[in-house]
């Protein structure tokens, strides 16, 4: 379960099959990523530091044409994450 400001915003269930978990953790190109739009660089760095423990980084924190700060990583459970800060937020 993922919480933000004390509220549950996302939950997943994981497989108990060790072969699936091993394959997911070893992924260098995920088939699906859970994208989280974060408010600022501090929030992104905080999430990144938590999720990278026991997992691995696919693309370290850096800028993309559509985001001043983003990263791709796989957490210790084999879940692929795309973390980003929007460049523009309309009113």
Image (spheres, grey):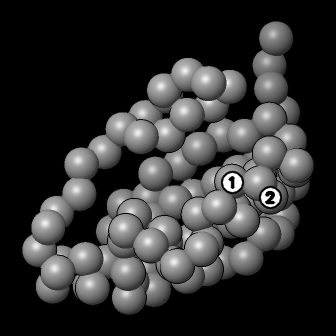
Residue at left 59%, top 44%? Answer: 36
Residue lying at 53% horizontally and 48% vertically, measured from the top left: 35
Q: Secondary structure at mark 2?
A: helix
Q: Image height check: is 68 above or below 20?
A: above
Please report the residue visible at 61 percent of the width from the left and 72 percent of the height from the top.
52
Pick the front one: 12 or 27 = 12
Residue 24, image x, y percentages: 31, 77
Quadrant that contains the N terminus: top left
Compared with 19, 61 (above or below) is above
Which label number is shown at residue 47?
1
**Residue ID for mark 2:** 45
Image point 82% across, 11% down: which residue?
A: 91
Residues at discs 2 and 1 in contact (Cβ within 8 Å): yes
- Local SS, label 1: helix
Residue 76, picture quadrant: bottom left
**Residue 45 place in picture, x, y as percent:** 80, 58
> Seen in the image, is 55 located left or right of residue 89?
left
Q: Is residue 47 above or below residue 11?
A: below
Q: Quadrant of residue 17?
A: bottom left
As drawn, which residue projects farthest toward the top?
A: 91
Q: Quadrant of residue 28?
A: bottom left
Q: Nearer the viewer, residue 1 or 71?
A: 1
Image spot of residue 49 (x, y percent) = 72, 65
Q: Position of residue 18 (x, y in %)?
A: 17, 81
Viewer-proximal residue, 9 or 58? 9
| Residue 91 shown left or right of residue 24 in the figure | right
Mark 1 Cα within 10 Å, few/some/many (few <14, many 20+)? some
Q: Residues within 10 Å of mark 2 (few under 14, many from 20)?
A: some
Residue 36 vs residue 78: left or right? right
Query: Mark number for residue 31?
Result: none
Can I make out residue 65 in this image?
A: no
* CA–CA distance in space, label 2 to label 1: 6 Å
């Amino acid at each position: 379960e993922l919480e933000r400001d004390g509220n549950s915003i996302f939950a997943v269930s994981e497989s108990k099959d060790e072969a699936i978990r091993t394959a997911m953790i070893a992924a260098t190109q995920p088939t699906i990523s859970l994208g989280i739009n974060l408010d600022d660089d501090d929030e992104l760095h905080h999430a990144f530091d938590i999720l990278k423990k026991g997992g691995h980084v696919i693309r370290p924190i850096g800028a993309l044409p559509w985001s001043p700060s983003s990263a791709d990583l796989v957490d210790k459970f084999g879940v692929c994450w795309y973390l980003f800060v929007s460049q523009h937020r309309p009113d």
